[in-house]
Image (cartoon, helix red, strand yellow):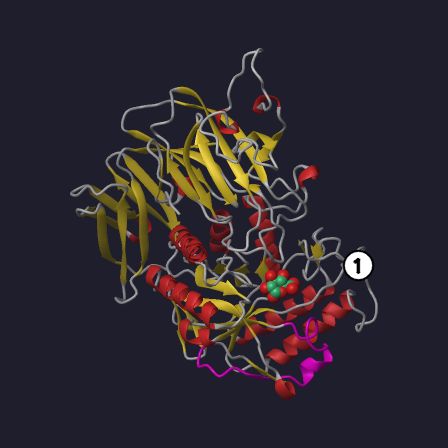
Amino acid sequence: MLTWSSIAQEVPLLSNISSRNNISLNGKWNYIVDPLENGYFDYRLMPFETNGFFENKTFKASELQEYNFATSATMNIPSDWNTKDEKLFFYEGTVWFKKDFKYTKSNNTKGILYFGAINYDAKVYVNGKFVGSHVGGYTPFNFDVTDVLVDGNNFVVVKVDNKRHKDNVPTVNMDWWNYGGITRDVVLSQVPETYIEDYLVQIDKNEKGIVSGWIKLNSTVANQKLTLQIPELKIKKEVITDSNGMAYFKVKAKPILWMPQSPKLYDVTFSKSDENVTDKIGFRTIETKGKEIWLNGKKVFLRGISIHEEAPFRQGRAWSKEDAVTLLTWAKELGCNYVRLAHYPHNETMVREAERMGLMVWSEVPVYWTISWTNTDTYKNAERQLHDMIYRDKNRCAVVIWSIANETPHGNDRDMFLSKLAKYAREQDNTRLISMAMEVTKSPNNVNRLEDNMNQYVDIVSFNQYLGWYRGTNESCKLMQWDIPYNKPVIISEFGGGALQGLHGDKTERWTEEYQEELYKQNTEMFARIDGLAGVSPWILVDFRSPRRQLPGIQDFFNRKGLISDSGIKKKAFYVMKDWYDKKKEEYK
Ligand code: GCU
């Protein structure tokens, strides 16, 4: 999956990118729509060595010119093209993007070109030279482009292809819009020749009263003096790198613990002679005890809501702090202490804002529905996305659950794939809880029974259930019993139903707010009968675009299960859920 080329290469992710010495490449990019990849292949389908759009060639009047970025339209990046150019609303294919930028070269400074995410398949060129490619629409990646940068005027070209493929992750069908483009921040980060690449700082999992972790340099240089500082805890610890460029530390500390009702964060600085990297870090513990989830040694109920990365009001891919604060403020108004960020890793700002606002996070890779379980490249793709999600957010105390899948069909191939992925997640991070959204399989005689072989690989047994919408009626909630034969906490990771905001009628009439309100009333009453229920995340906070929702006048390519409409108006069911959470909050005081 890593693409290595002679002059530039993909390098491990720069942690905490927003704190680095960056040139932002956000803003206007020229773009060329290229449905037949005419800028990449010749007419015999051979990739161009030269003459591709990536060259951004200047032509003489006598030469044949058939593309020109400079006279092409522009689009503000980050964004998805679907909502920025109405000709591209349904478009799935290649769009080329180009951006000019100035750069001042200096000795012992490296240029790292960083993308927050590109959906889905990206090929990146700097000054006409290929620097690398990346697949996966929701995780960051970066390239060391030092050797292709020039002093003064430079340009970057990106070929983005969002076509769906059976063996991709996600696969060809999903219930969300396949927004294509450079959908998150782009920066050129200037770092020293030897730089602080990554770090981890947490409450020690095994030793009370200890904060431990490590600092990693980009190169295997030993005996480099590094300093960890947490001023508010009166910590200033000097450490020395080993032959792997790693420096480990353990310091005595009793930090105020992060919790939703008081989300305490500390300024933590990692430094060396020529570099300082400052992050805001919270400290907490998360564990399960039998059927309970414990935060900081105290039983907690996850009062959640599921959220897609869809921008409030304007739709399209959310990416900004404003988008995050709007969505998370609605979650707080609902009475949440927890959000399920579905069905893929959301942008880093969203996770950091959840942490700042006091919301625990379920973060998920898009191993969604009917993935190609026997394809080894598909598995490597899923594992790479899981790695990058954990790598990016391992210092975010708000993240308490890593989810490896959603609604995947039972079977040996799927069990092999997911059990391997679950073990990998545990290897990458044994300090957080592992889960996945399962499905209720049988309900003989009004007993909903959850049976899933994956129960042994997860810490929390989570499942989606749609009584009153896809199965049964709202009334059938009254009779339903639940049989979950595992001594683990239970989260209902999805329940809900659709309503068009402003459509009113009898509570038995589908798509009315009254129907959705009744569904929430009946479901939340039923939850009292679920032994070991430790959290819920209703589907979903806000109506969101989906190519699977065609009912004219009602859906119009929106999934209407939001508790809030796409224009930000709360539906009646919102208040049912809010009341239930208010009572839960009292119960767990
Ligand atoms: C599924 C799935 C969601 C989907 C929802 C629905 O549970 O996980 O991605 O949007 O149901 O049908 O609305």
- Residue at the extreme bottom: 445
Residue 74, located in which quarter of the rendered image? top right
Query: Closer to the camera, 460 or 121?
Result: 121
Place of residue 331 in the rendered image (x, y in percent of width and height, measured from the top left): 59, 59
Residue in view at x 27 percent, y 57 percent? 212
Coordinates of residue 13 in the picture (x, y in percent): 37, 44
Residue 479 on the magenta segment:
yes
Q: Is residue 206 left or right of residue 397?
A: left
Asked whether residue 411 is drawn in magenta, I would say no
Q: Quadrant of ligand 1?
A: bottom right
Residue furthest to the right = 505
> Under 8 Å from ligand 1: the CB of mark 1?
no
Q: Image point 23% across, 48% down: which residue?
A: 246
Quarter-of-image position of residue 552? bottom right
Residue 133 relative to residue 523: left or right: left
Image coords of residue 449 (percent x, y): 56, 82
Taken as a whole, is the magenta stretch helix, strand or loop?
A: loop
Residue bounds of the magenta highlight = 466-488
Q: Is residue 349 left or right of residue 307?
A: left
Determine crowd level at label 1: few under 14, some 14-19, many 20+ residues with C-alpha closer than 10 A: some
Q: Does residue 537 appear to the left or right of 105 in the view shown?
A: right
Q: Which type of secondary structure does the marked residue at label 1 adopt?
A: loop
Q: Which residue sits at x=56%, y=14%?
A: 63
Q: Position of residue 319 (x, y in %)?
A: 55, 45
| Amino acid under disc 1 | Gly
Is 193 drawn above or below residue 400 in the view shown?
above
Give the residue pinned by disc 1. Answer: 502
- 30 is higher (above) or lower (below) than 383: above
**Residue nearest the observer in this picture, 349 or 299:** 349
Q: How many marks?
A: 1
Which of 13/418 is in front? 418
